[in-house]
Image (spheres, grey):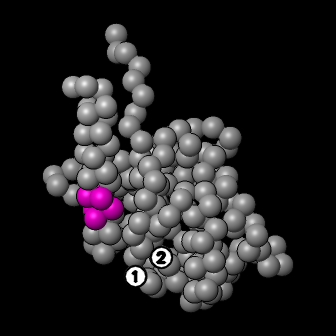
Amino acid sequence: MSEPTIPEDVKPVSSLFSPDKERIDEAIAALTDIFGPVESMSGELFFDRTRYYAREMGWPLYRRFVSFKELAAPDRLPEIKLQANEVEQRHLREGKRRVNIDPGFVSAERLILATGKNYIHRVYLAKGIYADLTLLFQRGGFQKLPWTYPDYADPETIDFFNKVREQYMAQLRVKRMVADGSSGA
């Protein structure tokens, strides 16, 4: 019989894209109220792997990936996605999104994104939110899966998330040392 265990905290991350670069910065600032301070941010990227969002949001689209310094319990993901949706709502114009926010987390083993859409590789969490297994950490780095979005499979994106994972693992080591020291071990 397996014994239930509480998972370690995870590193919150988010993807943001918009036709308006300043709106991305505004949304990142709003996300710091949810996640805390930004730890890492990608350079500005051109969101060009799909035109799926062009009709709603316009074109061209710009993207940034961010990670946040404070760790969070992984079971907060549905709440975090709903809060990110509220930030998107604040930026609606004529009922259309002007910024898209896809929060998730990095753990030692994986990159998970939150979504409201079901699919074969997504697991329902709560409150209408699913966990999307996007990347797996194997053989020293994140690896794409058959369903990984092309932009997340891009080497530059994988490199960003590998660096975020390095920061996360260093944070966990410090957290464990502090816990070991405080427990008298």
Farthest residue to the bottom: give it.
60
Quadrant in which residue 153 is drawn = bottom left
Instruction: Answer with left or right where residue 7 lies relative to residue 126.
Output: left
Which span is picked out in magenta? 162-167
Q: Position of residue 65 (x, y in %)?
A: 45, 71
Instruction: Answer with left or right where residue 19 lies relative to residue 148.
Output: right
Give the mark, 1 or 2, whose residue is nearer the N terminus.
Answer: 1
One can see residue 63 in this view: yes
The secondary structure that most of the magenta stretch takes on is: helix
Q: Position of residue 83 (x, y in %)?
A: 67, 55
Q: Residue at x 40, y 76 (%)?
A: 42
- In the rendered image, residue 65 lying in the magenta stretch gets the answer no
In the rendered view of the protein, which quadrant contains the C terminus? top left
Circle 1: element type? loop
Which amino acid, mark 1? Gly
Which amino acid, mark 2? Arg
Q: CA distance from mark 1 to mark 2?
A: 6 Å
Mark 2 surroundings: few (<14), some (14-19) or many (≥20) residues within 10 A: many
Q: Is residue 35 above or below residue 60?
A: above
Q: Which residue is mark 1?
A: 43
Mark 1 surroundings: few (<14), some (14-19) or many (≥20) residues within 10 A: few
Q: Which residue is mark 2?
A: 64
Q: Residue at x 75, y 66 (%)?
A: 89
Residues marked 1 and 2 touching at CB (< 8 Å): yes
Quadrant in which residue 27 is drawn = bottom right
Q: Residue at x 30, y 75 (%)?
A: 156
Of 73 and 17, nearer the camera is 73
Q: Is residue 152 above or below residue 2?
A: below
Q: Residue at x 63, y 77 (%)?
A: 26
